[in-house]
Amino acid sequence: MNFASDNVTGVSPEIMAALAAANEGSSMPYGADAISQRLNAQFSELFETEVVVFPVATGSAANALALSVMSPPYGAIYCHPEAHINVDECGAPELYTGGAKLVLLPGVNGKIDAATLESTVSQAGAGVVHSVQPAAVSLTQATEAGTVYSVTEVQAIAQVAHAHHLSLHMDGARFANAVVRLGCAPADITWRAGVDVLSFGATKNGAMAAEAVVFFNSALSETFGYRRKRGGHLFSKMRFLSAQLEAYITNDLWLKNATHANQMAAKLSHGLSTVPQVELCYPVEANEIFVRFPEAIANGLLSQGFRFYHQPTPNHTITARLVTAFNTREADVTAFVEAAHRYATPVEALS
């Protein structure tokens, strides 16, 4: 009954089994083990092109280290104000880049758009010594509003970015949920659309602690190994990160997990849309739901043992974030909707 985050969940049985198997015997350290050595080929097959892959343990490390090779200390990285790199990483991108500036671009439903990027970069002072220099763009997929960039939206942003000699990064903490929503090949929404580097998330979708930095532009990867070591993310027992990632993409486990999470979000949002006084804040396109309802409903739900992040808004209402996961129980979704109905003011009392 905990809808606070997809981080509250445990580990997929398939991934736990892979960790147990990796625990047998001895393996060479620092990525020289057999599992780690297989990842480049496996991810290249997944993305239908040759890629370079680096496992790390956290999404913040994946993002910050990826951006460190995409922007100089005097560079500008363009992102949405609600992007995880801006709101939730305690300045890690600025630290790892040596001081690059995050430049925030407004946009509806958690997304930036190509026109805004073009206007901003065109006036950014490229080549002017007094200005931070445009260096990179970072997209969150799925976004922090629970929405998803379409292939054409990414293509348009990439076209602007590359025309101005900027690299394009994708924060894919919930990349699997976006791919499921789009129904496209992973390649279509990444390198074919113009993405240079992807932070490929696994932890929120069934892994214990594993993310991958995937380079489609191999030239950007040349110094990444040193930066990962210097940043404390070259694990001596790397096989345990790599085993998670290998199991995650084997037999499409990552897509199966995300499919269930998305389906539970769709069921939850549909149910809540029938509750009086409940308002969905954004389109529900992945596994996050943002909803506004009276404090009475929130307090009732919390008293019943449901958990979710929430903050007060005007007129005695709250805005809640509800997140579903690979192992969210349908019975809990149904119970949440039924409880919301119980604590809502009847329709006839509102008229």
Image (tube, helix red, strand yellow):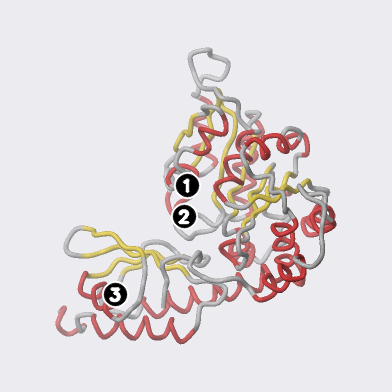
* Disc 3 element: helix
Query: Residues at badges 1 and 2 in contact (C-beta under 8 Å)?
Result: yes
Label 1 sits on residue: 83
**Looking at the figure, which quarter contains the N terminus?**
bottom left
Rendered location of residue 159, percent (x, y):
65, 38
Asked whether 276 or 95 is in front, the reply is 95
How far is mark 3 from mark 1, CA to CA? 28 Å
Rendered residue at 29%/75% (across/down): 302
Q: Position of residue 220 (x, y in %)?
A: 72, 35
Q: Which three-letter amino acid code belongs to the residue tagged 2?
A: Glu
Q: Check disc 3 and report the residue beneath it.
A: 302
Q: Secondary structure at mark 2?
A: loop
**Residue 233 versus residue 187: which sits nearer the camera?**
233
User: How far is the residue under mark 3 from the one under mark 2?
Assistant: 23 Å
- Numbered label attached to residue 144: 2
Left or right? Give the position of 103 relative to 203: left
